Image: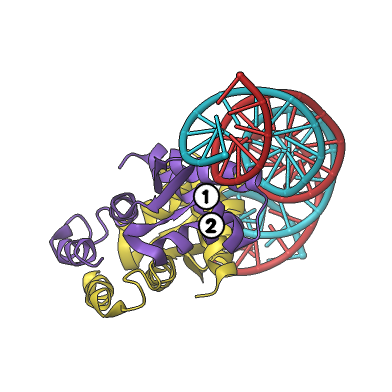
Chain colours: A purple, B yellow, C cyan, D red
DNA sequence: TCCATATTTCCAGAAATCATGAATTATAGA
DNA sequence: TCTATAATTCATGATTTCTGGAAATATGGA
């Protein structure tokens, strides 16, 4: 992951509703939720929610897929893993061998 | 970790220079660096750096300790781990047993 | 005590972000 | 084709964040 992508992801998550959206989708896992259901779950106006989903999507934190009139959103765990790797880069003084097993375990986590 | 703490950490890191500072300190590990050296490494004005270190400190991402005229800063890995745990809460549909080993591995990482 | 260094705090204008109403696009079904 | 539903896009005022200069604080050494 490059710095600009990490900045996009971090600032996207550094916002009350967007953090709620992301955690909601993380909990729901691969089945995700359609925009309307997310709006209902978070008691949000549809345009506000749409704008925030757009920010999360551009940051690569969620992916979307149209289902008829609905659009389904899912959390993208690959981006989370890349982000963590970026934040922890060279965290063991350049010898990352100690960190790799942790990242691998996280990859298999969900 | 509570939501307000996660928001503080994420929005703190969602800023170009603060992300650079944090990653710089992560690479340096437990020995950290004094403010002046960080400013030199990042070619930053001292007041700007100080303001950004303050944001990171209030978010719990760095800790500081005075050393004579200098103040030494270190990245706080415990906050990072808590943040990751918060973001991934219930990520396996409520059965977190699959994630715990990954978090433990990360805790031992550095 | 006086001075130099290291860092922080204060302040103000500039820039970016945010929330909301209104309008628009896309799709399904009658 | 017409209508209703789902979601997005647009426009704008309000709020927040950011940057950098100037001043203040803290410490060590002469």
- What's the residue at 47%, 63% (across, down)? A24
**Image spot of residue B70 (x, y percent):** 51, 62
| Circle 2: element type | helix
Residue A99: which disc?
Answer: none
Tell which of A92 and D3 is nearer to you.
D3
Residue plotted at (26% across, 80% down): B97
Tell me the residue that label 2 is attached to: A37
Q: Residues within 10 Å of mark 2 (few under 14, many from 20)?
A: few
Do marks 1 and 2 both belong to one polypeptide chain?
yes
Q: In which quarter of the image is the N terminus of chain A?
A: top left
D29 or B88: which is nearer to us? B88
Q: Where is residue B74 in the image (x, y as percent from the top left)?
A: 42, 65
Q: Would residue B16 be visible to someone looking at this image?
A: no
Q: In this view, does A81 lie to the left or right of A21?
A: left
The residue pinned by badge 1 equals A35
**Position in image of residue A9 (x %, y %):** 44, 47
Residue located at (33% from left, 68% from top):
B30
Chain ID for label 1? A
**In the picture provided, is C24 more to the left or to the right than A86?**
right
* A42 left or right of A59 in image: right
Q: Mark 1 and 2 residues: CB-CB less than 8 Å, in contact? A: yes
The 10 Å Cα crowd at callout 1, few under 14, some 14 to 19, many 20 or more, is some
Viewer-side residue, C26 vs C16: C26
Q: Where on the picture, by quarter, is residue B107?
A: bottom left
Quarter of the rendering occupied by the C terminus of chain A: bottom left
Vertical position of residue D9 compared to residue A21: above or below:
above
Residue B95 quadrant: bottom left
């Amino acid at each position: 992951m490059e710095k600009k992508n990490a900045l996009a992801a971090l600032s996207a998550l550094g916002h009350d509703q967007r953090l709620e959206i992301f955690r909601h989708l993380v909990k729901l896992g691969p089945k995700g939720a359609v925009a309307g259901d997310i709006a209902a779950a978070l008691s949000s106006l549809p345009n506000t929610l749409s704008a925030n989903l757009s920010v999360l999507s551009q940051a690569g934190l969620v992916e979307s897929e149209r289902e008829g009139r609905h659009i389904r959103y899912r959390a993208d765990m690959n981006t989370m893993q890349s982000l963590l790797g970026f934040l922890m880069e060279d965290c063991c003084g350049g010898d990352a061998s100690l960190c790799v097993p942790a990242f691998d375990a996280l990859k298999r986590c969900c």
